[in-house]
Image (cartoon, rainbow, N blue to C red):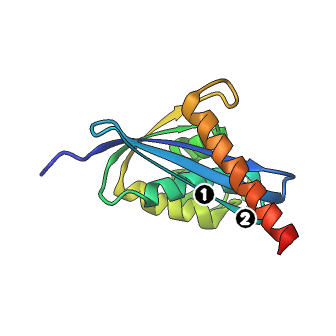
Amino acid sequence: MPARPHVELFTDGACSGNPGPGGWAFLLRHPASGKTIEDAGAELDTTNNRMELTAVIRGLEALTAPSVVDIYADSQYVLKGLEEWLDQWKRRGWRTASKQPVKNEDLWRRLDELRGRHTLRYHWVRGHDDHPENERCDELAVAARQALVHQGRSG
């Protein structure tokens, strides 16, 4: 069985108001080839956490083969959810420790599917701290959000 390709996935989400218009972005790098893919998008009525989750989902969906993925994110919500909470939520029937429904369950379920396809490793980066890839993702997410808001005003 051939070794899985290794990739680095950098993600960020941005929201103006919470809820409000938001953007997501990812930068996917294949270290072996040096190839980089970027993508971003936006939603009019969302939350910051939904945009952070969407960025990771879209980045993982962009992979065409099962891979070893180093995820770099500034969202403790996303990283702790993947590393610590997700399996517990599933065991409890998508309920938190306090028996409340898991917020953003639809996105967490999709991430769980993708987690089953790839080998994920998690890395927290401090947001807005001159981390080049995190800054680039923030720039792309904010631009996507602003473009959507501008389009809504002129449309």
The residue singled out by tag 2 in the image is 43
Furthest-left residue in this view: 1
The residue singled out by tag 1 in the image is 54
State the image coordinates of residue 90 (x, y, percent, origin top left): 54, 60
122 or 32: which is nearer to us? 32
123 or 36: which is nearer to us? 36
Image height of 77 relative to 51, above or below: above
Q: Earlier in the sequence, mark 2 or mark 1?
A: 2
Determine whether the residue tagged by mark 1 lies in a helix, strand or loop.
helix
Residue visible at 58% across and 53% down?
A: 55
State the image coordinates of residue 41 (x, y, percent, origin top left): 63, 60
For badge 2, the amino acid type reads Glu
In space, the residues marked 2 and 1 are separated at their CA atoms by: 10 Å
State the image coordinates of residue 53 (x, y, percent, origin top left): 61, 53
Q: In the image, which is nearer the foreground, mark 2 or mark 1?
A: 2
Residue visible at 85% across and 70% down?
A: 154
Image height of 73 relative to 109, above or below: above
Residue visible at 57% across and 29% down?
A: 132
Label 2: few (<14), some (14–19) or many (≥20) C-alpha neighbours in 10 Å: some
The answer to which image quadrant residue 116 occupies is bottom left
Determine whether the residue tagged by mark 2 lies in a helix, strand or loop.
strand
Residue 97 makes an appearance in the image: no
Residue visible at 61% across and 67% down?
A: 106
| Side of 31 where 27 appears, left or right | right
For badge 1, the amino acid type reads Thr
The reply to whether discs 2 and 1 touch (Cβ–Cβ < 8 Å) is yes
| Side of 44 where 57 appears, left or right | left
Image label count = 2
Residue 63 makes an appearance in the image: yes
Label 1: few (<14), some (14–19) or many (≥20) C-alpha neighbours in 10 Å: many
